[in-house]
Amino acid sequence: MHTRFSTMGIERGFFPKQNDELAMRFTTQRDAIPKLIQNLQGLGYVVIGPSVSEGVVRLMEIAAPDDLASGVVDIQAPGRYRLSGGSSFAFSAVNGPDSPKKFLHPAEVELVKYTEDGKGIELVSAHQSEKRYAFFGLRPCDLRGVEVMDRTMMVPGFEDPVYSGLRNNSIFVVVNCTRAGENCFCSSMGTGPGADSGYDLAITELPDKLLLDVPERRANLVKGIELAPATEEDLRTGEEMVQGARDQMGRRIEEENPAKSMYAGLDSCVWGKTAERCLACGNCTMVCPTCFCNTIRDKTDLRDGSVSRMRTWDSCLSKDFTYSAGGNPRQARAARYRQFVMHKFAYWTDEFGVYGCVGCGRCITWCPVGIDITETVNGVLKDRRERTAKLEAPPTV
Amino acid sequence: MLFDLGNAGTPADYLPGQFNMLYVYGVGEVPISVASYRKEKLLMHTVRSAGTVTSVLTSLGAGATIGVRGPFGKQWPIAKAKDKQLLIVAGGLGLPPLRPVIEEALAAPDRFNGVRVLYGARSPPDLIYTHEYDRWRGAGGCEFFLTVDRGTREWKGNVGVVTTLFPKAGIDPKGAVAFICGPELMLKFSILELAKLGVSPENIFISMERNMSCGLGTCGHCQLGPHFICRDGPIFSYPQVRDFFPREGV
């Protein structure tokens, strides 16, 4: 059995527990879900959860309990996503193309607006948002995705005000996975299938009821809900079901803490071979819960001549992403594909102290040609192992 | 280009090697290194018309208003050259970010065991700051060398890339600390030649150019391996970047 990496070996620490507070564990019936949603709304949150739209489970506002994608099962494969029904579970779909990034680091945002009156440039407005999001039914990998984003967008002294404002106003109701998606590999990245910290409420869906993990400070989220203390039996069932998802996971990264080996694989032939299939469309970076790259452009309003500085998502797969007067360092598609993967599996650990990949598998599902990032990484690792073995092998005379 | 910062600060707030994001209303922003020296009255940037923003920027007249966001990045480690030979190597528009270092060195040349400035451009008309050369040459302790890739009929000086100046400059391999800025190819060959002379990699510092866009390490454009050039650079010691530069496509 492939066990979960406890730390991925990073000295600077991998998601330390926020505090040592006691979590209280209860069970409740599945019909408590509407009340949970109501409680969040009552506290002033916009509830965001999985909802079906045009045949895909998206993260959208859950205005009423019926909006939840309950009973829907996602069937995923490289380059393939379909929905079917028939599940008795309320949180039955694993993950769709959206992650909290869509809300906390919006795809398009007006950073500032200026006018010019002939005498100088005047600031009209700077981005401000009072939005308070409650992510409801979030998967553990996506919760870790938010923590990875925290490290990139909230570096002390370089804090991004848009992200930190939205993020600090958000709370997270996580649902532990009891079924692994076809493209999932969170157990290799140490980010799932169960969440052990960082949530405001954790739910494990047992066959006949919900097991709740309620941090003490969040008792208000379960107010008015009929709770029973969780029994030993409930806790064991929950753990077994999460373990079931772990055992079910068909994809994995072959080496624990692969950053060092990946650095040594910068010149691997795998990059070029894989890039022959890559369309450089950037889908992988759009659906990735941690890809943060963006471009800021001026948008001029022709009516009054005012200018908005617009920030939009961008992608290291785009040809002109690195273009400057000095030339374009990543002209070749293989170089751009390598940047995407090396960033996640090597550079990120030096930049932010964690891996940039949380193993959600979205880049595999939403790649139009089904490129599998685990296959690429394992290929680079294997290539390197073989070359090292060749060097170390005794000479055959 | 000289900029009056109004009440937004003085050139002393901008350290040698750092850069600003210059903004033209309705057009966009570009990263441009600080060319002024802290004791000067006005902030100076040297801009060549190359892309959309710089072409508008260079066509602005006196009295125009632009946006200045900065300063960003690390500075040249001038203290590391104390009591050593300070070797300044610039190619083309790589001279502006080194101009404050030259001025800093000339203000107190006794801190160094000699100062050498080596500057190369494509052709004589491409040379910048020509009015400063006599003053730099005349300053005590500083030796100034010029070269162009292609000469003209009037050109009497050295012809060849900047590394052709190395044998003439009296470089002290053991005691030199080199600051280099220019196109990537020029950086690559300068480093190679200095290494051949025996200058240790730890004593070679380069200023890298990439598509710096946010200045904060949150847009991703300027990454070089595990470094954000805008935040961790643009000044790097050679050992910091040698696994990623000049490797193709990183």
Image (spheres, coloured by chain):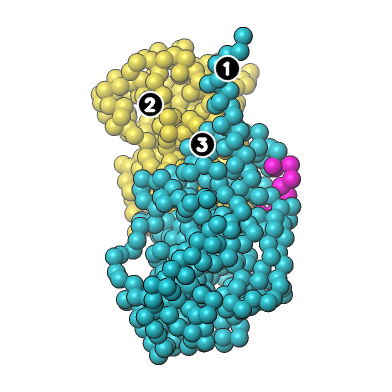
Chain colours: A cyan, B yellow
Three-letter code for the amino acid on which mark 1 is drawn: Val
Spatial distance from mark 3 to mark 1, Cα to Cα? 45 Å
Residue at screen point 45% across, 83% down: A28
Residue at screen point 49% across, 84% down: A29
Give the labeled residue for mark 3: A261
Quadrant in which residue A308 is drawn: bottom right
- C-beta proximity under 8 Å, tags 3 and 1: no
- C-beta proximity under 8 Å, tags 1 and 2: no
Q: Is residue A63 above or below residue A19?
A: below
Observer-side mark, 2 or 3, equals: 3
Residue at screen point 74% across, 42% down: A276
Spatial distance from mark 2 to mark 3, Cα to Cα? 25 Å
Numbered label attached to residue B159: 1
Three-letter code for the amino acid on which mark 3 is drawn: Ser
Q: Chain ID for label 1?
A: B
Discs 2 and 3 carry the same chain letter = no
Q: Chain ID for label 3?
A: A
Discs 3 and 1 carry the same chain letter = no
The mark nearer the N terminus, 1 or 2, is 1
Nearer the observer, A329 or A123:
A329
Residue B59 appears anywhere in the view: no
Give the labeled residue for mark 2: B202
Q: Chain ID for label 2?
A: B
Observer-side mark, 1 or 2, equals: 2
Q: Which residues are magenta?
A: A274-285
Spatial distance from mark 1 to mark 2, Cα to Cα? 30 Å
Q: Residue A368 location in percent, x, y?
A: 73, 56
